[in-house]
Amino acid sequence: MKVKRSAGELFFDGFNVTFMIVMSLVMIYPFWYILCLAFNTGADAARGPIWFFPREFTLENFAYVFRYPNIPHAAFITLARCVVAPIFSVTVNMLAAFTLSKRWLPFRKLIVFFLMGPMFIGGTVVSNYLVVAKLGLLNNFLVFVIPGAFGYFNALIMRSSIDGLPQELQESAFLDGAGYGTIFFRIIIPLSKPVIAAFLFFSVVANWLDLGTNLLYITKKSLYTLQWIMYLAINSTEAKNIIIDPRNRNTAQQIAEMAKQSATPTPQVIRMAILVVVTFPILFVYPFFQKYFVKGMLTGSVKA
């Protein structure tokens, strides 16, 4: 039987749908605008704003970006840290979670107390810099891996996930002669795939988008990441000078003429192409981890 809905309910649903569509467009449009500029010729972009579609489509902007000497090496460093750092971080947190899941662990409460402290009392920029310097991690690739490897909140969620597994599995493995290493790698890891996948994705995103590490601890060009290259490109003097005031038509025309004569993309479209190269790839990682999110993050949420 079809339930008749009142006018108020229909209006409320219609308002919600309209509001969500408008908000989605508002959030999506900046990304779409960046794409339009990135795939548009610099000379045409200098003539005036591009709103919905590229007026003169080109791939030369991306070819120019990839010919930039620092981009390929920065991409390699970024990909390397997005592989090494998440794997190392998840391994450390899973080992800590497995250890803390043992109720008989000596001084367990004291260990938890000390691990919980940094969650509420974090170090300052100066103190963190001194620690990194004393460890010899300045201008070292390991600065991308070691400082952020352990997080008690992550270990807490993973411990709750392990606590939710049937204890009979571990007990029967002990009876069959298995040690803690065998139990961890043969039982705990396979049954914890959802939570591991979720935190792997979070770590990959955090490492991909990280800018502060390069800003504070890296001065060697050989360790520049894509985010740092993008930061330098956006904040360069050349990039700032290319920003056009739409009211100044003479400036726009002069820049357009210069771009046509040199046949080189303008800094404005180069910045947008760099934004696409640096930011958009991480969006395509999400579908591979989506199915693990809800199960992985809600595992252990009842008891922590």
Image (cartoon, rainbow, N blue to C red):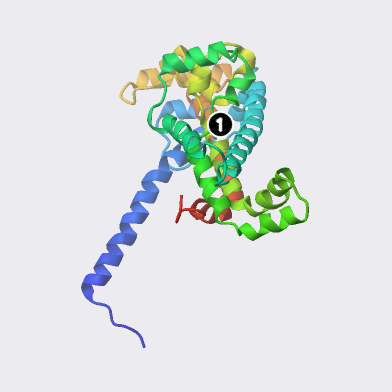
At horizontal 59% and vertical 52% (from top left) the residue drawn is 194
286 on left or right of 251: right
**Between residues 196 and 112, which one lies in front from this camera angle?**
112
| Quadrant occupied by the N terminus | bottom left
Per the image, the residue denoted by label 1 is: 207
Outermost residue, bottom side: 1
Is residue 211 in sight in this rendering? Answer: yes
- Residue 90 spot, x, y in % from top left: 60, 38
Outermost residue, right side: 177
- Residue 98 spot, x, y in % from top left: 60, 44
**Between residues 235 and 302, which one lies in front from this camera angle?**
302
Q: Secondary structure at mark 1?
A: helix
Amino acid carrying mark 1 in the image: Asn
Q: Is residue 148 above or below residue 295?
A: above
Q: Is residue 244 above or below residue 175?
A: above
**Between residues 174 and 227, which one lies in front from this camera angle?**
174
Answer few, some or many: residues within 10 Å of disc 1's Cα (few below 14, many 20 plus, some between 14 and 19). many
- Residue 3 spot, x, y in % from top left: 32, 83
**Between residues 35 and 163, which one lies in front from this camera angle?**
163
230 on left or right of 27: right
- Residue 109 spot, x, y in % from top left: 47, 39
237 on left or right of 245: right
Q: Is residue 133 above or below residue 116?
A: above
At horizontal 38% and vertical 27% (from top left) the residue drawn is 121
Quarter of the image holding residue 84?
top right
Quarter of the image holding residue 77?
top right
